[in-house]
Image (cartoon, rainbow, N blue to C red):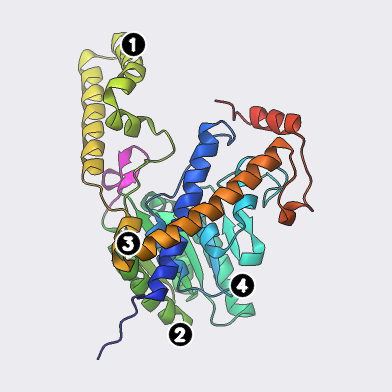
């Protein structure tokens, strides 16, 4: 009888807890961002938890991960201290990277986890991690997480080629939400990504990112193959991100509350139509293109409903899920309170006592200097 690699019972509950913790931390980040405590844009991984947790559940401490500009779910799943991460995204010196990494450029060397906000950079990073791992920790693997648009970057394809040529144990995990910011990925991608991966000599497989059990099983087979020295692999996982490219994505806001948001988007459109230069037909075509894009995005969100946590809850049962949710929510709330106290200059949690403390005025000045006030 064929053995199933899908997590069941306590194993699935453990994976669900990891997903719930990732989601809770992302929501905490949004709260902090809404209050102006997080500078710049905020790219969350809400909707990607099934992919990240499903892959991480197949890894060991000897394995390494290279992350994209949505690194926090993987770092939380890997075991990064939550308060330290929240302090980091607020630009505080007590953060995991002394406040210098923001939310995109995060590093946890002790966990063999490295992130870079440059689109496509996780590919080359993973190749380097895999090469080092093969020499220092035989049997280990490296994972690169990235979105489907990153597959069109030159250095990502160079990473495919290098990993294949050197048979590096790299798992390239493509988190495909079908959109490259506000452009449908199919409009800017030639051919199929699965075909492209196979053309480079990668073993390629697909999985539904909303079904963590399926994702876990597929990733497990690919990781086992790599540990056996059979070269790199490509995992294509479809997902749905309800919040768009970044927090308060204008087009997503427009779809959710058109009456409120039309007041913001209409004036510049009208001004552009009236501005000198360009033909009337060109302007009409541009407006039609924008309207079609908004309509396509609205249809995409209307067909969403692919929440990996909701599906995992049904698998483990309402009672088990409620117990886990309560525990995770309490844990993350404590971490958020610790981070907020530290930013305000109040006494922090014991595990952060050795890090430098900024007083409240310096914390406010740092946030403002980074454009964090809203």
Q: Quadrant of residue 208?
A: bottom left
- Give the position of the N terminus as an image quadrant: bottom left
- Residue 286: x %, y % from top left: 26, 24
Q: CA distance from mark 2 to mark 3?
A: 39 Å
Q: CA distance from mark 2 to mark 1?
A: 61 Å
Q: CA distance from mark 3 to mark 1?
A: 52 Å
* Residue 29 appears anywhere in the view: yes
Q: Nearer the viewer, mark 3 or mark 1?
A: 3
Contact between marks 2 and 3 (CB within 8 A): the answer is no
Taking the image as shown, residue 292 lies to the left or right of residue 235, namely left
Q: Who's the residue at 26% across and 47% down the image?
A: 186
State the mark number for residue 132.
Answer: 4
Mark closest to the chain's N terminus, 1 or 4: 4
Q: Which residue is mark 1?
A: 271
Q: Which residue is mark 2?
A: 228
Q: Which region of the structure is painted magenta?
A: 178-190
Contact between marks 2 and 1 (CB within 8 A): the answer is no
Q: Who's the residue at 44% across and 37% down the image?
A: 247
Mark 2 secondary-structure assignment: loop
């Amino acid at each position: 009888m064929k053995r199933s690699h899908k997590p069941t019972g306590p194993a699935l509950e453990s994976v669900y807890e990891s997903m719930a913790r990732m989601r809770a931390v992302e929501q905490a980040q949004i709260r902090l961002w809404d209050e102006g405590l997080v500078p710049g844009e905020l790219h969350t991984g809400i909707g990607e938890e099934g992919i990240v947790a499903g892959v991480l559940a197949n890894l060991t401490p000897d394995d390494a991960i290279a992350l994209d500009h949505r690194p926090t779910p993987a770092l939380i799943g890997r075991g990064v201290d939550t308060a330290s991460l929240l302090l980091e995204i607020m630009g505080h010196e007590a953060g995991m990277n002394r406040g210098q990494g923001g939310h995109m450029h995060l590093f946890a060397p002790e966990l063999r986890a490295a992130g870079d906000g440059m689109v496509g950079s996780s590919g080359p990073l993973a190749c380097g991690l895999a090469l080092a791992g093969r020499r220092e920790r035989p049997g280990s693997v490296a994972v690169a997480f990235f979105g489907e648009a990153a597959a069109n970057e030159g250095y990502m394809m160079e990473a495919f080629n290098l990993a294949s040529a050197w048979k590096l144990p790299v798992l390239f995990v493509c988190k495909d939400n079908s959109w490259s910011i506000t452009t449908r990925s199919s409009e800017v991608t030639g051919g199929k990504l699965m075909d492209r991966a196979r053309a480079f000599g990668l073993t390629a497989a697909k999985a539904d990112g909303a079904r963590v059990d399926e994702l876990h099983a597929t990733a497990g087979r690919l990781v086992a193959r790599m540990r056996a020295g059979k070269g790199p692999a490509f995992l294509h996982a479809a997902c749905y991100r309800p919040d768009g490219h970044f927090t308060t994505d204008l087009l997503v806001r427009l779809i959710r509350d058109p009456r409120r948001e039309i007041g913001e988007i209409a004036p510049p459109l009208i001004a552009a139509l009236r501005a000198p230069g360009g033909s009337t037909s060109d302007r009409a075509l541009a407006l039609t293109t924008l309207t079609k894009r908004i309509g396509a995005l609205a249809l995409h969100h209307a067909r969403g409903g692919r929440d990996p946590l909701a599906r995992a809850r049904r698998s483990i049962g309402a009672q088990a899920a409620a117990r886990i949710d309560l525990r995770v929510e309490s844990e993350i709330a404590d971490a958020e309170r610790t981070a907020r106290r530290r930013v305000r200059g109040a006494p922090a949690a014991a595990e952060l006592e050795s890090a430098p403390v900024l007083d409240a005025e310096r914390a406010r000045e740092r946030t403002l200097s980074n454009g964090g006030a809203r």
